[in-house]
Amino acid sequence: MLWTIKHLPKTVAEFIGNEEPRQEIRRWAESIESGTKEKPLLLFGPPGTGKTAVAKALAAEMGWETVESDASRLRSAADIKEVLGASAGYGSLFGSKRLLIIDEIGSTSDRGSSSALAALARESAQPIIFIANDAWDDAVKPLRFLTRPVEFKKLNSRSITAALKKIAKAEAMAEGDYIDEIAKQSSGDMRAALIDLQSSGGKAIFSEREREAGMFDAVRRTLKANNYLEALKAADGVDEEISTMLLWLAENAPIEYEDPAEVAKALDVLSRSDIFLGHVRKSNNYSFWKYARTLALTGTALAKKNRYMKFAKYSFPSKLSKMSSSRGTRAALKSAGLKVGGIVHTSSRRAKKDVLPYLSKQQAESLGLEKEERVAIEDAYGKL
């Protein structure tokens, strides 16, 4: 069983971090129980901060039944009726309330689903919790004034470390520095940290140097593979996402293959594999991972007519190199986008595109941007 399920907190109080949002959610539920009509909640914040899990734990504590759906399935009043049935208007057979949990707003929803959700927020007689990553996403905009927004923030690494140590003890795993490392690399995502803890087996996770060496070997095995099965097994044991593997293969197929037609075929296969990954990101249907992996490895390997016996000096993906070298700048730009987006009531992405490039030095300072944020804006868009 996945530990993200096995060690899921049973009550709202058992969750780590975001104490004020959790208290606000609890007060909202108690107010509804007392007979007060309340707006639906809009829980928003980064993945892995417990938004959906808290909503389910709240329902269990309050004795409410739950009805769950993701926003992409609710594009019209007819869809709401089909998916949620009478749940949107009536309680359970035993007179208790039903909590409607509508997840993934923004990532999979469009204008049609946004309008349907707004109608649901206005008309439902049952408590509703909407869940999104970005409250300023265009798809979420119609809901902002119909709901009570509650922000969930990233968890700090100390809180994650403490929780992981407790779980490691329950699973009879040895304590060690690897737990602190997992917590630091999680970027505030408890779900990701727990997945890493389970997959670590109680051992230190790979260092960046070990990961890089493993990727070079996997690329070599893939590009030298002579048949389907050999290619399919080429990346076994490599602790990297298939999306990263795609970057490595796209960078090195032109180095290994000498025939332009072979290179073109390999890159075409990789682009098709990336389409499957796009389906994963849009639908959260992770069954597409295996198709993306199989297509990338076997398709790239079999794009060549014959195995090349030469020694090829493979390269680290240039895109990853640029991302690594600019990590500090990107983080500062993201921080500036979030600050400015909150002030002008737009998403951080739109703030970065439509506001930051046109700020003067005085405007940047008056908006409270730190020195590193102002420097990052100058590096990205020119002198303030």
Image (cartoon, rainbow, N blue to C red):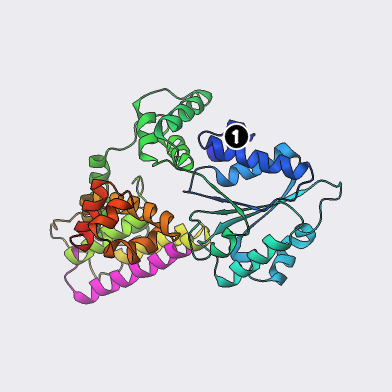
Q: Nearer the viewer, residue 195 or 357?
A: 357
Q: Indicate left or right for 252 with 290 as reference.
A: left
Check the image and report above or below for 5 versus 358: above
Task: Tell me the chief SS of the magenta region.
Answer: helix
Q: Nearer the viewer, residue 285 or 20?
A: 20
Task: Report x, y in % for residue 250.
Answer: 26, 63
Image quarter of residue 209 = top left
Q: Is residue 27 magenta?
A: no
SS class, disc 1: loop
Q: Which residue is mark 1?
A: 9
Residue at the far bottom: name it: 261
Check disc 1: other Cα within 10 Å, few if <14, some if 14-19, many if 20+: some
Check the image and report above or below for 246 versus 161: below
Image quarter of residue 204 = top left
* Residue depicted at 36% across the width and 57% down the height: 243
Picture quarter with the N terminus: top right
Q: Amino acid at mark 1?
A: Pro
Q: Is residue 260 magenta?
A: yes
* Residue depicted at 50% across the width and 35% down the height: 17
Q: Indicate left or right for 213 with 153 as reference.
A: left
Asked whether residue 256 is in view, the answer is yes
Task: Report x, y in % for residue 320.
Answer: 25, 54
Task: Report x, y in % for residue 223.
Answer: 25, 60
Magenta-tinted stretch: 256-279
